[in-house]
Image (tube, helix red, strand yellow):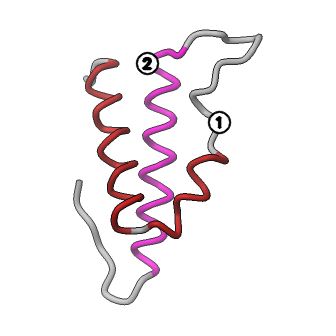
Amino acid sequence: MDTEKDLSLKILNITMLIKDQYPELSKYLEEMKVTIPDKSSPEITKRSLEAYYDSLNALLSKYVLELPGGKYNL
C-alpha cells in the first residue's frame, strides 16, 4: 500500500518520463484535473493521488503500446 509520499514520488517520476521521453503527451498533463481541489473536496487525498497516478499510467501505457515495438517499465 503506497503512502501519499510514495504516490507523489510515483507521479513525479511518471510526469518526468512523459516530459523527457514523450513530450508530445505533455499537453494532456495540464488537462488532467484529478488532483486539483475544488469546493466539494478541497483536500488532495490519497485516493485522488492514486486516481491521478492511474490516469497518467493509463495515458502513457496506451500511447506507448500504440507505438511500433512500444513498451515501457516504471
Characterize the magenta stretch by its predominant secondary structure: helix
Task: Name the residue at 75% across, 11% down.
Answer: 40
For the residues labelled 1 and 2, the Cα–Cα distance comes to 15 Å
> What label does residue 60 carry, if any?
none
Q: Nearer the viewer, residue 12 or 46?
A: 12
Q: Amino acid at mark 2?
A: Lys
Task: Name the residue at 77% across, 11% down.
Answer: 39
Q: Which residue is mark 2?
A: 46
Range of residues picked out in magenta? 44-66
Can you give x and y, in whole percent of width and height, for residue 43 in the image? 58, 10
Q: Nearer the viewer, residue 74 or 26?
A: 26
Q: Is residue 73 left or right of residue 16?
A: left
Can you give x and y, in whole percent of width and height, for residue 21 in the image? 34, 68
Q: Which residue is mark 1?
A: 33
Identify whether 33 is placed above or below 56.
above
Can you give x and y, in whole percent of width and height, for residue 48 in the image? 52, 25
Task: Name the residue at 43% across, 39% down.
Answer: 53
Can you give x and y, in whole percent of width and height, for residue 12 in the image? 34, 39
Which mark is first along the chain, 2 or 1? 1
